[in-house]
């Protein structure tokens, strides 16, 4: 692929073209040359081998001259600048020059070298060459447009991928300050109460920050690492709150082989803790169940009080929805349900 897109200089020109351009155009002219060799093969017997070679060479060289004059001079200088009159005039003038040279050569070859075998007039020769020239110019123009279209599609695809990667990185970067804000609020609340648990919170926070800074820079990480991060996060929340909650995390499958983007599950857990554990009193619960395989099947259920029923998720859930759309377009399903006293989120991702 690198060699395919490598640029080289054209002989007798400062213009640089890709290897793909050279190979495609070479194949095109080899095909055209092969067609003329087959069409004019009778000249070997009727005239001689030198006239046969001269006939094919003159036609191919003239077609190449008018084709590349059109592609690299008339098109960019006139047509691309919307100077349509100048472009048509230049094109017709070049065609007229080609017709004059080619028709005079054909008239000499068929009228004097081959003789009575071909009794075509100069007008007939001009007509034949005119329409054949338009045909081959049309083919060359179609070839150029096809190559340009293919190159533009590759460029558009590259821009789309870079744009998606930039958006994912931006959304992912929002998670860290969002979490850090919540964690600092926790530490602030404990210091206000002069709690002996504040040093342990600082320790947990340092462990979480180490993960965020050094272990989550990959595009995807094992689910096992993400779960360890979530466990630390839950312990941090336990230290913040005096309430006892029923928290369970169960995983079926190989968590060390399932790869996911970092911080993909965190927004769901944050939302459950913020609007569930912190508002449901002594009946608070949080149950996270994950099945791994070709499809990641996640179900998170948490307690929910009536006061929290009308609350909406913050930037964390919006962040998650956008990341899922960018990372797994058409391959994920995120649903929510609100039975009495609970809030349930199910997420399925085809890996």
Image: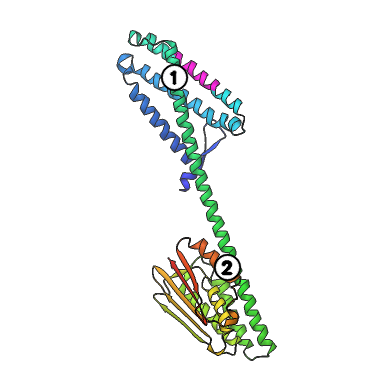
Q: Is residue 208 visible?
A: yes
In the rendered structure, the answer to whether residue 48 lies left or right of residue 100 reads: left
Query: Height in image: 7 above or below 165?
Result: above
Q: Position of residue 223 (x, y in %)?
A: 46, 73
Of callouts 2 and 1, the N-terminal one: 1
Q: Position of residue 194 (x, y in %)?
A: 68, 90
Q: Position of residue 18 (x, y in %)?
A: 50, 40
Instruction: Locate the C terminus and report the quarter of the image it occupies.
Output: bottom left
Which mark, by number, is residue 303?
A: none
Query: Height in image: 61 above or below 325?
Result: above
Which mark, by number, is residue 318?
A: 2
The residue at the point 35 percent across, 24 percent down is 37
The residue at the point 65 percent across, 87 percent down is 190
Give whichever of 76, 241 is nearer the camera.
241
In the rendered structure, the answer to whether residue 303 lies left or right of residue 296 reads: right
Q: Quadrant of residue 116?
A: top left
The residue where tag 1 is placed is 129
């Amino acid at each position: 692929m690198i060699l395919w897109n490598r640029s080289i200089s054209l002989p007798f020109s400062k213009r640089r073209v890709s290897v793909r351009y050279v190979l495609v155009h070479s194949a095109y002219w080899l095909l055209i040359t092969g067609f003329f060799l087959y069409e004019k093969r009778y000249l070997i017997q009727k005239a001689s081998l030198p006239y046969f070679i001269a006939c094919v060479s003159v036609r191919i060289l003239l077609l190449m001259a008018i084709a590349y004059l059109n592609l690299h001079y008339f098109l960019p200088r006139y047509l691309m600048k919307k100077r349509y009159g100048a472009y048509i005039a230049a094109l017709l003038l070049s065609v007229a020059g080609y017709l004059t040279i080619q028709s005079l050569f054909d008239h000499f070859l068929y009228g004097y070298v081959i003789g009575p075998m071909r009794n075509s007039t100069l007008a007939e020769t001009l007509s034949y060459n005119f329409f054949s020239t338009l045909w081959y110019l049309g083919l060359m123009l179609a070839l150029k447009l096809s190559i340009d279209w293919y190159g533009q599609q590759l460029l558009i695809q590259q821009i789309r991928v870079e744009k998606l990667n930039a958006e994912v990185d931006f959304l992912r970067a929002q998670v860290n300050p969002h979490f850090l804000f919540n964690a600092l609020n926790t530490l602030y609340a404990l210091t206000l109460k002069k709690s002996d648990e504040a040093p342990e919170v600082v320790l947990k926070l340092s462990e979480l920050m180490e993960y965020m800074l050094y272990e989550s820079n990959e595009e995807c990480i094992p689910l096992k690492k993400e779960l360890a991060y979530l466990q630390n996060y839950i312990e941090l929340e336990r230290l913040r709150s005096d309430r006892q909650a029923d928290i369970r995390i169960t995983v079926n499958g190989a968590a060390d082989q399932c790869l996911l983007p970092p911080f993909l599950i965190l927004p769901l857990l944050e939302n459950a803790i913020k609007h569930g554990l912190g508002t449901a009193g002594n009946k608070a619960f949080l149950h996270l169940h994950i099945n791994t395989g070709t499809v990641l099947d996640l179900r998170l259920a948490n307690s929910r009080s009536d006061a929290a029923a009308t609350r909406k998720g913050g930037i964390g859930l919006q962040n998650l929805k956008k990341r899922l759309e960018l990372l797994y377009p058409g391959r994920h399903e995120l649903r929510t349900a609100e039975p009495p006293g609970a809030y349930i989120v199910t997420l399925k991702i085809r890996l």
